[in-house]
Amino acid sequence: MGRIAGVTAAETRERLLQAAADVFAQRGYDGTRVADIAAAAGVSNGALYSHFGSKAELMVAALRAHGPRMLAGLLAAEPDRPIADVLLAMGRLLPRRREAGGYLIVEALAAARRDEEVAHPMRDYVGERADWLAGLVRIAQRDGDFDPALSSNALAHFCLLLAMGSALVTPDLHAVADEEWNALLTRVVTAFAPTDNPAQRSAPQ
């Protein structure tokens, strides 16, 4: 199982990333061998190492390629929708999320606590996600939806905690009624608005 005939290097890399996402989600980081991923992708160990230097590097690369994309999908679907509304819509989906990428982020976060080789690239990954979210918050502040006095970094961290926590506390462990969650989340997001913003007096629907 070397390089597959008729398959480009880019296609082989994508096969490896998809196989890694599937195998890590099923077996966990510690329970997965490089050989397992290579076999699932239909290539040799050598072909895998020609693309990725280690299992840890492959884990984080798989997360970047196939991790949770809920917010990005909402933004792409409605690029002109106010950022505050998009964040609220995403938050409403969190308690019942079923993204396969959610399992991958759980495994990556757990592995990062045990293995410094995973922790280093995971710090970069989480930092990039936080910076992206902080940028969205600043857009909402510029548009008058969020109070500019609030820290964009703190709000981004809050969003990360909610999103990653929802991957850990799944509905089969603990569920909450949609109407109860929506009412709470709307109250929280309304509190982010400037004090003179009508949103403080009229919650978004």
Image: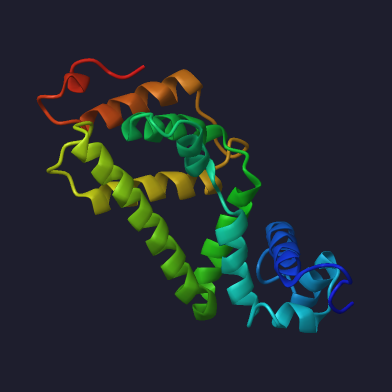
- At 40% from the left and 61% from the top, the residue drawn is 128
Q: Name the side, left or right, on which 182 lies relative to 149.
A: right
User: Residue 78 appears at what percent x and percent y?
Assistant: 46, 30
Along the line of sight, which residue is nearer the eye, 9 or 88? 9
Q: Name the side, left or right, on which 186 lies relative to 68.
A: left
Along the line of sight, which residue is nearer the eye, 176 or 38? 38
Is 43 situated above or below 198?
below
Is 95 situated above or below 18?
above
Task: Quadrant for the N terminus, please.
Answer: bottom right
Looking at this view, name the residue that lies furthest to the left: 196
Along the line of sight, which residue is nearer the eye, 140 or 98? 140
Q: Name the side, left or right, on which 6 lies relative to 37.
A: right
User: Residue 122 appears at what percent x and percent y?
Assistant: 48, 68
Q: Name the side, left or right, on which 134 lies relative to 194.
A: right
Is 31 situated above or below 83?
below
**How many numbered discs?**
0
- At 73% from the left and 67% from the top, the residue drawn is 16
User: Residue 24 appears at what percent x and percent y?
Assistant: 69, 63
Corner quadrant of residue 49: bottom right
Task: Quadrant for the C terminus, please.
Answer: top left
Is 45 situated above or below 59?
below
Corner quadrant of residue 146: top left
Along the line of sight, which residue is nearer the eye, 118 or 90? 90
Specify how the rendered protein is coloured: rainbow
- At 11% from the left and 28% from the top, the residue drawn is 195
User: Residue 100 appears at what percent x and percent y?
Assistant: 65, 47
